[in-house]
Amino acid sequence: MPEAALHVGSGKVRELYALDDERLLLVASDRISTFDVVLPTEIPHKGRVLTGLSAFWFARTRHICANHLLALRADGRSTECRRLEMLPIECVVRGYLSGSGWKDYTASGTVCGHALPSGLVESSQLPEPIFTPATKAATGHDENIDRDAAAELVGAELFADVERVSLALYGFAAAHARERGIIIADTKFEFGLDGGTLVLGDEALTPDSSRFWPADEYRPGGPQPSFDKQFARDYCESLGWDKTEPGPELPEDVVTGTRARYVEAFERLTEIDFDAYLADPEVVLR
Ligand code: Q0Z
């Protein structure tokens, strides 16, 4: 547990502590959310899978952008991070049309001011990845904004930097994942400033901050199965649950199947045995 660390924030499935003036401790729990509701049943090791994946990407994208990772702790679920002044926008990159991007396209033919070709269907691959910033809503859902609104929030120069860097990070990770059978349909980055330097923060390129789809099941024209959460979602749907709090308990076979999918995503993307990660988390940094 964090030694003399002040709790400074809670996400749906993560906790944030202050270590000192310069450093934060980010701890990923084994909680899982479906349809935006945190379920009462945990997925063993889920927090370690996400922490290990995020650290793996941080280690492999230093040539694109500096990041906040200072140390990965031996528990495999806690990272010491440099404290940043976070930018007030979510930096989303979409390579495929899904979620709010698909919804906005059906309503207007555009996503965050990007005019897209007609005739795209749900989950279509886009002609090229697009940067689709969103505001950070204190409660409820983030709102997509166009580039002018985003540039207003962070300044034109910084906007150009986060757009370029976000597209480069996505391009690198999506190509790596696609060669290993995983489509990263979209992903959300959060950046901050350290002095004047742009630094990638938060978690990056995990199944909680991205849509991971199994490439061998990709069929545009409808929603795609989630690489990690589909068993849990299907089980919840089978109950006829109304998707309000409290969520249902997951049975053992759904927990086991879901855990196996998280571990499979980790092993495919990192090419590292998950048991080797548990024994020594720093394997993902080498
Ligand atoms: C991340 C969040 C979580 C609740 C603040 N390096 C950083 N410097 C300053 N602030 C943050 C970071 Cl990562 C920061 N969040 C998101 C994470 C629990 C909220 F684990 N909020």
Image: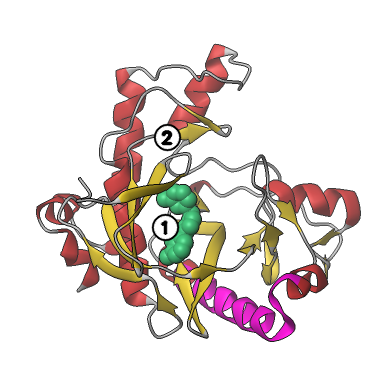
* Total residue callouts: 2
Going by the image, does 192 lie left or right of 118?
Answer: left
- Residue range (magenta): 153-173
Q: Which of 176 and 247 is in front in this view?
A: 247
- Mark identifier at residue 32: 2
Q: Answer whether residue 129 is magenta in the image.
A: no
- Tell me the chief SS of the magenta region: helix
Going by the image, does 169 lie left or right of 240?
Answer: left
Q: Which amino acid does label 1 sit on?
A: Gly
Q: Answer whether residue 162 is magenta in the image.
A: yes
Which residue is at the far left?
279
Going by the image, does 112 lie left or right of 67?
Answer: right
Along the polypeptide, which appears first: circle 1 or circle 2? Answer: 2
- Mark identifier at residue 181: 1
Q: Position of residue 68 (x, y in %)?
A: 38, 71
Q: Can residue 207 be seen?
A: no
Q: Can residue 219 be seen?
A: yes
Comparing labels 1 and 2, the label whose residue is closer to the camera? 2
Q: Nearer the viewer, residue 77 or 86?
A: 86
Residue 1 sits above or below residue 166 on the image: above
Q: Quadrant of residue 145?
A: bottom right
Q: Where is residue 179 in the image (x, y as percent from the top left)?
A: 41, 67
Point 51% across, 59% down: residue: 184
Q: CA–CA distance between discs 1 and 2?
A: 23 Å
Q: What residue type is labelled 2?
A: Ile
Point 40% across, 22% down: residue: 40
Point 42% across, 42% down: residue: 228
Q: In the rendered image, which quarter contains the N terminus?
A: top left
Residue 110 sits above or below residue 222 on the image: below
Disc 2, SS: loop
Point 41% across, 70% down: residue: 176
